Image (spheres, rainbow, N blue to C red):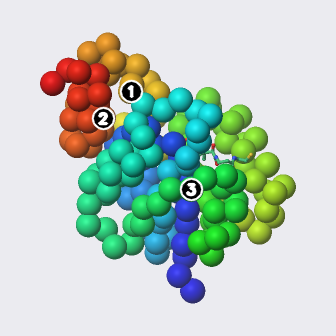
Amino acid sequence: MTKLAVYPGSFDPITNGHLDLIQRGLRIFDTIIVAVAKNPAKQSLFTVEERLEMIRVAVGDKPRVKIDSFQGLLVDYVRSVNARIVLRGLRAVTDFEYEFQMNMMNRRLEPEIETVFLMTGLPWVFLSSSILKEAAVHGGNIEGMVPPYVFKQLKRKFGQE
Ligand code: PNS
């Protein structure tokens, strides 16, 4: 049996913290599906297509990593791809409350699906897509926090080329 995990998120955009988590997740799982949530109610900087493209470029040629998007409930998507495991990263204590609540709800909705948490890599504990965008929009140097292609796309988005 191959161990398949779904790594869901907004990925608006993907950061080096996410990439670190994917890399480490591959030590545990045979295949990881990186799944971008389509949430029309949530204001995003990049379109789903742009986010998928940035993930594709950042992940590169890794046959064990698949990239997809989904709409609606995460547990329905996880079931639809015949997976049983959700992979999530945990930064400092601030993430705990939100992740705890989401995990409890997901388990209530679908008890067969388990969420596995990996601690975020130490260099990235402070990093989130939101704080990154906050720095980038004001011209902060975010080099080294995101893959090079994402760096370019952020500059383009904020008209800083
Ligand atoms: O990167 P994020 O924004 O923290 O990811 C949150 C995400 C996409 C994993 C979460 O919002 C989600 O699973 N959305 C789909 C709808 C859903 O199933 N929500 C949780 C149970 S109500």
Q: What label sits on residue 10 in the rendered view?
A: none
| SS for callout 2 | loop
At a point 23% along the width and 29% down the height, the residue shown is 156
Q: Name the residue under label 1.
A: 132
Q: In this view, does 152 lie to the left or right of 72?
A: left
Question: In the rendered image, is residue 124 in sight?
Answer: no
| Vertical placement of residue 20 versus 110, above or below | above
Total tally of numbered discs in the picture: 3
The one nearer the camera, 28 or 151, is: 151
| Vertical placement of residue 43 versus 8, above or below | above
| SS for callout 3 | strand
Observer-side mark, 1 or 3, equals 3
Observer-side mark, 1 or 2, equals 1
| SS for callout 1 | helix
Q: Name the residue under label 2.
A: 145
Residue 106 place in picture, x, y as percent: 75, 53
Q: Name the residue under label 3.
A: 70
Q: Is residue 143 left or right of residue 86?
A: left
**Residue type pointed to by label 3:** Phe
N-terminal of the pair, mark 2 or mark 3, is 3
Q: Split into 4 quadrants, where in the image is the N terminus?
A: bottom right
Please tell me how crowded label 3 is: few (under 14), some (14-19), or many (20+) other residues with Cα within 10 Å: some
N-terminal of the pair, mark 1 or mark 3, is 3
